[in-house]
Amino acid sequence: MTQGKSPRRSGAAGRIVLWIVLALFTAGGAYASYLSFKANPYVSNEARNGISKWQFMEECKGQLRTQLRTQLQGQIPAGWTLQYPPPVQRVQNVVQAPEGGWGWQSLVLIRTPDGNAVPAQFACAHDKSNGETRILGVQPAQQ
């Protein structure tokens, strides 16, 4: 008596389908990454403005912190922090300068260790011609 054996299959067709599916997923992931990088609001017009929007905002925040540290020395207790608006609002407040560069005007809260918050208005600009980013002014905000 012989047992019925099914012919042995190599699985080549299944392997080909698997490779096709894997290639499609990889291509889809690459395309999605491309679209998300292209639409990234922090990297817009780096060539036109001399610096990326994200880098400009980081330089402004660093310079603002340094300037406030000097201006507020002795006026408020050590340990203060800066609280910026939400990221979406920050990006919306940054504008392109007509001649190239960036401008940013925004409100920032200076938080003291005891929980008080002092609002301040600041302005920052990046000049593409000389590659310089600087704080244009900081003043107490009107309440």
Image (tube, helix red, strand yellow):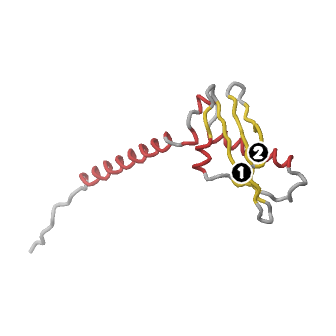
* Label 1 crowd (10 A; few <14 / some 14-19 / many >=20): many
The residue closer to the viewer here, 97 or 61, is: 97
Q: Are marks 1 and 2 in contact (CB under 8 Å)?
A: yes
Report x, y in % for residue 135.
76, 38
Asked if residue 88 lies left or right of residue 120, the reply is left
* Label 2 crowd (10 A; few <14 / some 14-19 / many >=20): many
The residue closer to the viewer here, 22 or 93, is: 93
Q: Residue at x 62, y 40 (%)?
A: 94
Compared with 119, 124 (above or below) is above
Compared with 26, 49 (above or below) is above
Q: Residue at x 34, y 47 (%)?
A: 24
Q: Secondary structure at mark 2?
A: helix
Instruction: Name the residue beneath numbered marker 2.
Output: 64
The residue closer to the viewer here, 68 or 50, is: 68
Compared with 47, 124 (above or below) is below
Q: Residue at x 15, y 67 (%)?
A: 5
Q: Residue furthest bottom?
A: 1
Asked if residue 23 lies left or right of residue 105, the reply is left
Asked if residue 99 lies left or right of residue 110, the reply is left
Amino acid of disc 2? Leu
Q: Secondary structure at mark 1?
A: strand
Q: Residue furthest front?
A: 143
Amino acid of disc 1? Val
Q: Earlier in the sequence, mark 1 or mark 2?
A: 2
Report x, y in % for residue 110.
76, 55
Separation of marks 1 and 2 at Cα, in angstroms: 10 Å
Report x, y in % for residue 97.
63, 30
Instruction: Name the residue beneath numbered marker 1.
Output: 108
Report x, y in % for residue 21.
32, 51
Asked if residue 67 lies left or right of residue 23, the reply is right
